[in-house]
Image (tube, helix red, strand yellow):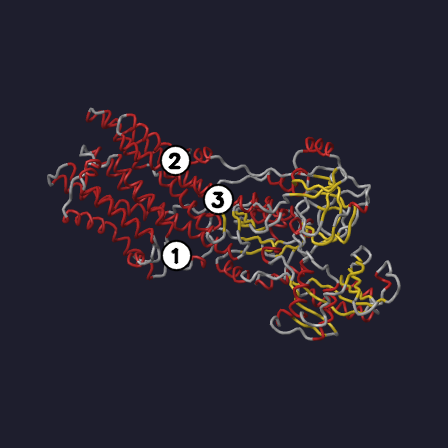
Amino acid sequence: MSIHPENPSITGLTSAEAANRLALHGFNELPTQKKRAIWTIMFNVMKEPMLIMLLVAGLIYLFIGDVSDSIMLLASIFFVIGITFYQERKTERALDALKDLSAPRALVIRDGTEKTIMSREVVPGDIVILREGDRVPADAAIIENTNLLLDESLLTGESVPVRKSIWDKISTSTQPGGDDSPFVYSGTMVAQGHALAEVMKTGVETEIGKIGKSLQSITDEETLLKKETGRIIKIFAVVGLSLCLLIVLIYGIARHDWIQGFLSGLTLSMSMLPEEFSVVLVIFLAIGAWRMSRHNVLARKSAAIETLGAATTLCVDKTGTITMNSMRLSVMVANNEIYDLSKNQNQPLPETFHPLLEYARLACQKDPFDPIEKEILAKSIDFLQNTEHIHPDWKIKREYPLSKEILAISEAWEARHGHSLVIATKGAPEAVADLCHFTPAESATLMKQIQSLANMGLRILGVARADFDGPELPTGQHDFKYKFLGLIGFADPVRPSVASAVTECYNAGIRVIMITGDYPGTAQFIAKQIGLNNSESYLTGSDLRNLSSTELAEKIKNVNIFARVMPEQKLTIVNALKTNGEIVAMTGDGVNDAPALKSAHIGIAMGGRGTDVAREASDLVLIDDDFSSIVSGVKMGRRIFDNLKKAIAYIFSVHIPTAGLALIPIIFNLPIVLMPAHIAFLELIIDPACSIVFESEKSEKNIMRHRPRNLRDPLFNRRTFILSLLQGLSLLTAVLAIYLFAFFSGFDENTVRTLAFTTIVLGNLLLIIINLSHTAHFGQILLNKNKSLYIVLANTVTFLTITLTLPLPQKLFRFSSLSFTQFLYCLVAAVISLIWFEIYKIVLIRKNKTF
């Protein structure tokens, strides 16, 4: 119903005043992250050094008239841009679909009438009408209030709604949280009642806006993986360009053919430039982001995926992340009997507890929005339907709302069968006991029961009833003669998958920390339910205020529960963990989590009920809000990095025979083997495809039984470097053996080139297979059902066959036909060159060791 007709003096702003204030203060909205334009995405991809050099080389070949080679080189660039653009746009569209939390409209009083406007048009001075289920559009002060309860969990982390009082026109706004505040805050939800409120602040001046501002002071860091691959690429680029110039000089001076020398130099530089590093990094993270989205984890920043696999500490917000952020009736106490509903879910409710549930229901709204009242209604339907305890024909005569003096609600009902009224009351147990005029002994007994239930992490309400036969209802609840009926306890249930997810985190060497605005007792109870380590110890927000940064960094090593903390303290905790060298992943769904989400190495926001601010600050978004999805994300992150490391090691290996075959013939004045078309063949057919193969490979056994990797460990350690170098040199030796054998046997230049190139391609395929797994041998890898591997093997062999047999491809690649025997020579040479690595791997597997 409308409130303002009861107070005609409230007319609100005029349309002209509202327009002036909108021009002065701006729209009531927060600045959002701008979408990246198509050209911005392309530029970010094209500024990679290797892609720039590929572009330059392709344009030069086009300029000198070698169109086919130019097209092949340029095609690889557009291939990368296409994949990146598709993934970025897909991610942005998915994020747009999630942005549905902020209030789209607001009901205000303007020109003396109710008017529905866009929430972004609300201005300071507007009078807004708040009703159950409404989201508050701006920070405001209450000027009229009827039993108003606000869910401020998005700002405070507390799931229990808080009551509001009327503004005295003197008090100034304080921080959200706590009962009896006369202020409401943008983004919070009306859980019960209705009110009129005068808007005080809009946009960036609101509490949400202040948190949004704090995010601007936190800068994103480039990942170590990105930095390391960048260094490797620069080294190869310098070496490649130096050798390119050297080859041009050697060719020009020795053979007097500067144009061909220039082409040969470019071919060599392209064979050495590991442009695949950039390609592989983009493809792995892009496809990894897509793969994670299938597990309900949306990557806003794909680079965070590899960091997630290295996470050592997971900071978890309790409300809505560990728990369901909903209230479930768990325990009932009546006539000194305790009934645990959670243990008797499918059993009828004993008769002793029927009046308790009956009058708890009568003390609720008919169509409640408050989650506790909704739960009471649901349980009364479950247990009391078709009994005398349900009263659809009763009419409510008066409501006695919650107040500062009496923390209880009473509803006066008129029963059809007589003139007497029935009063149903529920509220804080102490308040209900006071209404029932408990003796000190009765109060002491009640307090013991309350403490026992509180230790179970329950939200407790008392219930009472009264009869009234007088001619006129009294003005206050104390005038009734109540009979105490009992207590009802509500639990915010833990998500079913959380306990197992926490266990898996511990098995993976990941520490779990609970950060909450709730009370320590509730936090400890939840911690024990989910198996959190060291659940006996905790620090509160007041404790944190008395600790220096050094003291906190020391204490935080052994404390996993932080209760009653404010938003800025969450940020302090995350930063203290980072000071200790932890790789921090932070989950959260509220505005209060946003600064910590952005400061953490990996910010993980909840997609279902999370705020826009939290999602904007995060790296990953859990679409289904399921805590177990985080563990899936960690496992996926580890798998991605592990496979990425294998792929890059492979790329390093395969560039050695490629570069060697481009360099050695020039130095020793032998026939040129590799030309741009052959380099493009390797790049566009084998290398990008092999990246997909490595990305598609299943994770190694027990990948979640290993401690997180150290982000400071190089991508290439000494052992990996030596093994990759030996693989490359071994294959180069085999290719040179075939090349020299063919050359000195008197074969023509095209046949020599064909034999050498075929050996490289076959060896390349073998390198892919043997490097796919460190815990499986050749045969097991082929049986791992990696469909991408089968496709690449089939396509490469098919394409190689076509180029060796059909006239047009033979002409393009300057090949000749090979006999079956010659093909076997190439295959045997490739196998012999790499069989030593397979033997070495089998030995390690038998010794239960890994690389």
| Element on which disc 3 rests | helix
Above/below status of 676 relative to 181: above
Q: Amino acid at mark 3?
A: Thr
User: In the current view of this chain or complex, which residue is farthest to the right?
Assistant: 471
Between residue 472 and residue 242, name the one nearer to us. Answer: 472
Between residue 319 and residue 674, name the one nearer to us. Answer: 319
Between residue 17 and residue 418, name the one nearer to us. Answer: 418
* Residue wearing tag 1: 700
Picture residue at 59% right of the left edge, 64% below the top: 529
Q: Amino acid at mark 1?
A: Glu
Picture residue at 62% right of the left edge, 55% below the top: 319
Please report whichever mark, 2 or 1, sits nearer to the chain's N-terminal start. 2
Q: Provide residue 544's location: percent of width, then percent of height.
A: 67, 50
Check if mark 3's residue and mark 1's residue have beta carbons within 8 Å: no
Between marks 2 and 1 in the image, the one whose residue lies nearer the viewer: 1
Please report whichever mark, 3 or 2, sits nearer to the chain's N-terminal start. 3
Q: Amino acid at mark 2?
A: Lys
Q: Which mark is residue 373?
A: none
